[in-house]
Image: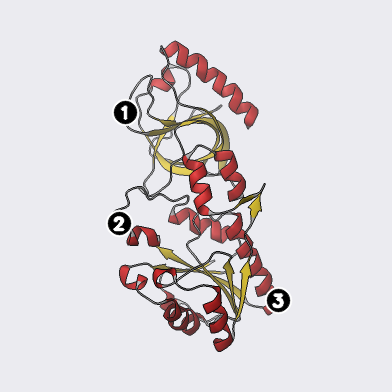
Amino acid sequence: MKIYHCIADFKPVHNPVVTIGTFDGAHLGHRAIFERMKEEAQKLDGETVVITFYPHPRIVLEPENTELRFIKTQERKIHEIEQAGIDHLIVVEFTREFAATSSEDFIRKLVVEKIKPRALIIGYDHHFGKDRSGGIQLLENLGREFGFDVDMVEAQSINGTTVSSTKIRNLLKEGGVREANQLLGHEYSITGTVVKGKSIGRDLGFPTANIKVADHFKLIAAVGVYACRVIHKNVVYKGMSNIGFRPTVDHGELTIEVNIFDFDQDLYGQEITISFVDRMRDEKKFESLDALKIQLAKDKIKAMTLL
């Protein structure tokens, strides 16, 4: 996949099939759009082009909102789009000046003039341009004017639930990782650098790797104990993770730690990814470290069963 960080750098391609969006999560709804794009591109002997934005528009438009968090980091989102088999990705810098662009000017001056789409594929709820005023009707009008087809992909649903980034974010905030994973079509994950902890887990017989997440806007799932997989240097291990404040031993700031089963390597300073499978229980304060140790042994058995 070719990546462009300025739309002016994009070189014309044959019969481009285009979509536009933020694509937080790269979930099943987004993947349905990508699949439709690839089908259309194959019919036209064309190439697929995804236009996305960085920073996320809400970061720019809602600077006072300290609660903003997103399912995917920019790096991970790009990876997911590449894995979906897209040919070209254009990352448009989102600024307040850009936000003032009318929906019609955005299509005319950027999409049509710079990319010359043969087809435009959008999701069922897609809106764009200043105040998100542009929608399917405008696109169809401009399509007739400039000679590109417009195709809308219907909402995707799993077990009666419509797939959306908002729904997935809410599920993760509530600890519903298994349900969120179903809507994502893959496991929710957190990537971070292993940092030194207090080694209490090692003393209990359950050594943990504590990770620091660099992206402030990365959504961290609800506090609790999870069955998980851990990816280190492209090798996948089983484990159990705790997101929380370690009330039995600490009462400090929020931490993300993972006990990797059958693993005894020094990970300090290295990057690992924790891929969450299911939430097993709430975090709780135990009467003693011995009581915590007994619970951790039960957690490991449950995690192994879930994994």
Question: Can you give x and y, in whole percent of width and height, for residue 72 in the image?
Answer: 47, 51
Q: CA distance from mark 3 to mark 2?
A: 43 Å
Q: Nearer the viewer, mark 1 or mark 2?
A: 2
Disc 3 residue crowd, few under 14, some 14–19, many 20+, Cα 10 Å: few
Query: Contact, CB < 8 Å: mark 3 with mark 1?
Result: no
Q: Label 2: state its secondary structure.
A: loop
Q: Earlier in the sequence, mark 1 or mark 2?
A: 2
Query: Contact, CB < 8 Å: mark 3 with mark 2?
Result: no
Q: How many marks?
A: 3
Locate residue 230 relative to residue 95 in the image: left or right: right
The residue at the point 46 percent across, 41 percent down is: 173
The residue at the point 50 percent across, 83 percent down is: 112
Q: CA distance from mark 3 to mark 1?
A: 57 Å
Question: Can you give x and y, in whole percent of width and height, for residue 66 in the image?
Answer: 32, 49
Q: Which mark is residue 43?
A: 3
Residue 13 placement: quadrant: bottom right
Q: Label 1: state its secondary structure.
A: loop
Q: Which mark is residue 63?
A: 2
Q: Can I make out residue 55 in this image?
A: no
Task: Quadrant for the C terminus, please.
Answer: top right
Task: Give the vertical position of 264 relative to 230 (above or below).
Answer: above
Residue on which the image places disc 1: 252
The residue at the point 47 percent across, 49 percent down is: 71
Disc 1 residue crowd, few under 14, some 14–19, many 20+, Cα 10 Å: few
Task: Give the vertical position of 31 relative to 117 (above or below).
Answer: above
Q: Nearer the viewer, mark 3 or mark 2?
A: 2
Task: Give the vertical position of 98 relative to 222 (above or below).
Answer: below
- Disc 1 marks a residue whose amino acid type is Gly
